[in-house]
Image (tube, grey):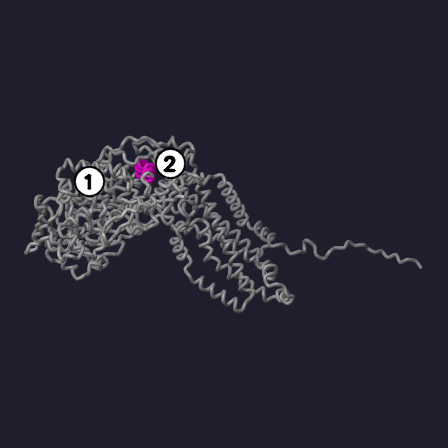
């Protein structure tokens, strides 16, 4: 008897999970969504450019000299030396725009992030633990959301003796985390009822580990959508408050201060170089954030994905 | 920054508070000014202020460029409503009682419906053209006032000298908390006893039986008395007598339905916003030509467009906006140098309300004289007046304004811009920068910060920032009170009631006819917000307020001496004098700008068109 020479076809052991079968990460989804949507792509490029230019430009600017009042240069029209003219205190408008855009963006970003952190923590705890904890936290949320946010910010700003960028961010955060908390709680509630969470609990995993290592990653997509859209809203809020006069102090330029120059009829009619760049910049930035945010939102929702 | 014709009231009453103005806007074309614009000095990154030597500007010469009467030869219409603007970004307080009002805005309103019993001529001396005539006897130290017959209050009751007596009773009363009780009032025989409660009436005020004559006897009789040196604003006894004096300022008869005997009576008040007047047919000088007047508040930023659109007939125009509106088509400018000075005051003590006296605090932060002087030398007020206010404000060398030409000390150069001297003074005083952070520490080596209060207003941030920069440059760390500009009413509340957080503040005074320093800088004056007193001051003021002052040579010498002492002791640094600029619509006729309404002419104002010229 001879050996049975069966041809054993050594087939390559192909794992059943191929790179192309793995569900793409959220980041890749977002990127694909953006690239696919013309508006979002252009917005993304423009926004990145603005941010890079503003931040790089702002580092070259010495804020102490450029915010100095210079009585002989009041309200000068754009010229070779002052590309965007000067304002009512004799300060160069171009550097003001850079500094202002940077400050406005940093504030908006800071507020969004702090609101996000607080909101997520509160929302997660509330949604995960449920029961009495949830009830208690929700009543607090309800109470705070009932308060007139804008009015209270104005009152507090008037009362605080010395305020700067940090205090301003704190004040705005104090009332702004509600939306994030509500959203996170809703999603967490939904996730908590799922099997994997029950399984983890049964295994005896620490609650906080479950919350942050298992539940949170599943809801990040929606949180990121929310954060992106609220970035635009916060930028608008900060600018609005400064425009009304309840924002940053005079020596800290912000896009809101620049836009408030338009409140004086003389400036509005005859000196567009003082308020037009800032106004255009705000509009463009908010639109860009919004378009990108919409793309991110679509990426997060599987039913709406274009790709 | 808002000034207006002042009421013909007595010396103390004409001391009103005006808000200090903000920044300036320069016009697009630089050819309009005739002073060297130091553009070359700013090309380099050197951040020093323009230390240009500008030719000495004489305020009265600049003021002479403007007319004080309206040019209008058109035929007048019957009646018409004059629309007057009250230029402020706050609400007006609305204390519409001559005994209780405190600021210039209320005085603007009072000017339309109240009067004093005496009128004054161009030299600010009382004449016989008013509601009362007068005589005086220097030897007997008396002034006798005779009320003219037929003058009525707005409710028809005749005006008598009893009403003036009543005003004295209110002001000198121990329950009176307003600012009008001062040295002039205490100078009336018997007033202090009445104030203390030891007498029921003021013995120095004698009313005749028919109530039409009042004889005032003074302790000291000096020239100031005839230049608005005693209270001449009556209030109707029959209207107010039922109200307790401590409640009078807040009562609705003061705030909502006050009456006077001026050419117009109050028709409607929207608190803080506007006052509507209608003609008082029985006005003693004749029925006013206008049917009524409306005074409304408007934000200073909006004045130029409002005047261009014909929204107002009369408005105070800001010097910062003037260069952009030099050739108006539907209105004209009136202007004159005003009896106003702006100043930086230092809080140097406290006010003792019981003893009605100022008490100096030797431990006040700003008690060091060299420190105060350095603060004065550090700021470039001449450039401020030139660039920021477009040449319509001037470095003030003294607290006597250019209107009082004969009294002004012309030798004083005042606190001109000399940062090197400022630094030197600070070094001498021991304020050195020991830790090299760019700011000086105090003589004990402790961190040193000065809290400075200044008002909100047009471009006030630029103004504040500029001054803080000037002080930073000599090494002084100056911070704003509460980290921001203070609203007009809140500002004077904090300054008047000696808020301990304020070390220095920028204010302004509209002075009256008589430059007698007693009511603003004397040790008995509640209006002396610096709370500073000194024996030198007291000695000089005593002479000015005594019968030695009839010797005009001595009086002039004393004024010179006083201004010099004020410069040397520096309880406050005078900063700016100003020209008041008014835009008047072309349909207005017979409108004359006079300092403090010395001529009663409101009833003669006419209009030549139904609508404002647009």
Describe residue B403's horizontal placement relative to residue A53 as left or right.
left
Q: Which mark is residue B68?
A: 1
Query: Does any portion of residue A45 appear in the rendered image?
Result: yes
Spot occupied by residue B273 in the image (x, y as percentages of width and height): 27, 54
Report crowding for label 2: few under 14, some 14 to 19, many 20 or more residues within 10 A (C-alpha).
Answer: some
Name the foreground residue: B567 vs B378. B567
Chain for disc number 2: B
Judged from the image, the secondary structure of the residue bearing numbered disc 2 is helix
Judged from the image, the secondary structure of the residue bearing numbered disc 1 is loop
Q: Are marks 1 and 2 on the same chain?
A: yes
Q: Which contiguous range is marked in magenta?
A: B371-390
Mark closest to the chain's N terminus, 1 or 2: 1
Q: Residue at x 21, y 36 (%)?
A: B560
Please determine whether, in this image, residue B273 is positioned above or below residue B549.
Answer: below
Judge whether residue B94 is colored magenta: no
Chain for disc number 1: B
Q: Which mark is residue B427?
A: 2
Q: Which mark is residue B352?
A: none
């Amino acid at each position: 008897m001879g050996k049975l020479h069966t041809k054993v076809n050594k087939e390559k052991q192909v794992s059943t999970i191929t790179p192309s079968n793995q569900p793409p990460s959220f980041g890749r989804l977002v990127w694909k969504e953006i690239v696919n949507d013309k508006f979002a792509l252009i917005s993304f490029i423009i926004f990145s450019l603005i941010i890079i230019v503003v931040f790089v430009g702002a580092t070259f600017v010495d804020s102490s000299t450029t915010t100095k009042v210079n009585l002989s240069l009041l309200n000068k029209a754009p010229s070779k030396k002052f590309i965007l003219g000067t304002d009512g205190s004799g300060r160069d408008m171009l550097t003001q725009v850079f500094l202002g855009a940077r400050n406005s963006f940093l504030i908006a970003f800071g507020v969004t992030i702090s609101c996000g952190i607080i909101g997520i923590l509160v929302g997660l705890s509330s949604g995960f633990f449920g029961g009495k904890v949830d009830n208690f936290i929700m009543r607090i949320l309800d109470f705070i959301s009932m308060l007139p946010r804008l009015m209270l910010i104005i009152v507090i700003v008037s009362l605080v003796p010395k305020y700067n960028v940090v205090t301003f961010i704190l004040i705005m955060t104090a009332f702004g985390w509600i939306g994030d908390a509500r959203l996170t709680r809703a999603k967490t509630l939904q996730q908590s009822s799922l099997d994997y969470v029950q399984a983890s609990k049964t295994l005896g995993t620490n609650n906080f580990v479950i919350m942050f290592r298992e539940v949170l990653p599943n809801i990040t997509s929606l949180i990121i959508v929310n954060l992106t859209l609220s970035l635009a809203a916060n930028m608008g809020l900060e600018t609005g408050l400064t425009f009304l006069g309840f924002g940053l102090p005079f020596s800290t330029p912000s896009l809101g201060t620049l836009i408030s120059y338009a409140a004086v009829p003389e400036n509005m009619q005859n000196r567009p170089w003082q308020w037009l760049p800032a106004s255009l910049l705000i509009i463009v930035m908010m639109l860009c954030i919004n378009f990108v945010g919409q793309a991110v939102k679509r990426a997060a929702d599987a039913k709406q994905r274009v790709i | 920054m808002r000034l207006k014709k002042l009421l013909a009231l007595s010396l103390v009453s004409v001391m009103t508070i005006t808000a200090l103005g903000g920044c300036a806007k320069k016009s697009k074309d630089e050819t309009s000014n005739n002073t060297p614009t130091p553009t070359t000095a700013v090309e380099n990154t050197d951040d020093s202020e323009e230390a240009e030597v500008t030719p000495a500007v004489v305020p009265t010469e600049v003021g002479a460029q403007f007319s004080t009467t309206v040019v209008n030869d058109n035929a007048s219409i019957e009646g018409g409503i004059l629309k007057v603007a009250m230029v402020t970004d706050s609400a007006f307080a609305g204390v519409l009682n001559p005994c209780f009002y405190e600021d210039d805005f209320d005085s603007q309103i009072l000017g339309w419906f109240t009067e004093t019993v005496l009128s004054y001529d161009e030299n600010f001396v009382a004449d016989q053209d008013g509601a009362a005539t007068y005589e005086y006897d220097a030897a007997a130290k008396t002034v006798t006032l005779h009320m003219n017959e037929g003058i009525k209050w707005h409710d028809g009751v005749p005006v008598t000298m009893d009403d003036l007596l009543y005003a004295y009773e209110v002001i000198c009363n121990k329950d009176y908390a307003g600012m009008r009780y001062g040295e002039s009032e205490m100078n009336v025989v018997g007033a202090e006893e009445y104030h203390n409660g030891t007498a029921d009436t003021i013995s120095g005020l004698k009313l005749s039986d028919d109530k039409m004559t009042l004889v005032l006897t003074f302790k000291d009789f000096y020239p100031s008395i005839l230049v608005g040196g005693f209270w001449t604003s009556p209030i109707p006894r029959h209207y107010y007598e039922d109200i307790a004096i401590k409640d009078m300022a807040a009562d609705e008869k003061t705030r909502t339905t006050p009456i006077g005997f001026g050419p117009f009576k109050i028709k409607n008040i929207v608190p803080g916003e506007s006052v509507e007047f209608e003609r008082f047919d029985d006005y003693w000088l004749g029925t006013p030509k206008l049917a009524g007047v409306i005074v409304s508040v408007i934000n200073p930023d909006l004045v130029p467009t409002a005047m261009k659109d014909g929204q107002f007939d009369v408005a105070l125009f800001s010097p910062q906006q003037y260069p952009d509106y030099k050739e108006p088509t539907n209105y004209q400018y009136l202007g004159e140098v005003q009896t106003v000075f702006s100043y930086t005051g230092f809080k140097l003590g406290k006010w003792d309300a019981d003893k009605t006296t100022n008490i100096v605090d030797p431990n006040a932060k700003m008690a060091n004289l060299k420190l105060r002087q350095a603060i004065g030398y550090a700021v470039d007020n001449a450039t401020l007046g030139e660039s920021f206010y477009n040449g319509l404000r001037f470095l003030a060398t003294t607290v006597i304004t250019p209107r009082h030409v004969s009294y002004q000390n012309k030798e004083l150069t005042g606190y001109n811009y000399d940062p090197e001297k400022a630094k030197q003074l600070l070094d001498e005083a021991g304020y050195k920068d020991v830790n090299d952070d760019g700011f000086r520490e105090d003589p004990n080596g402790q961190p040193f910060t000065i809290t400075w209060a200044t008002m909100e207003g047009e471009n006030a941030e630029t103004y504040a920032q500029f001054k803080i920069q000037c002080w930073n440059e000599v090494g002084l760390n100056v911070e704003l009170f509460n980290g921001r500009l203070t609203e007009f009413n809140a500002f004077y509340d904090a300054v008047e009631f000696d808020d301990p957080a304020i070390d220095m503040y920028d204010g302004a005074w509209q002075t009256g006819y008589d430059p007698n320093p007693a009511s603003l800088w004397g040790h008995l004056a509640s209006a002396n917000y610096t709370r500073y007193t000194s024996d030198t001051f007291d000695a000089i003021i005593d002479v000015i307020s005594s019968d030695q002052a009839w010797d005009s040579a001595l009086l002039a010498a004393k004024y010179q001496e006083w201004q010099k002492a004020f410069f040397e002791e520096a309880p406050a640094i005078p900063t700016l004098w100003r020209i008041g600029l008014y835009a008047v619509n072309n349909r207005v006729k017979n409108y004359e700008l006079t300092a403090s309404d010395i001529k009663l002419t409101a009833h003669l104002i006419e209009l030549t068109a139904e609508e404002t010229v647009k």
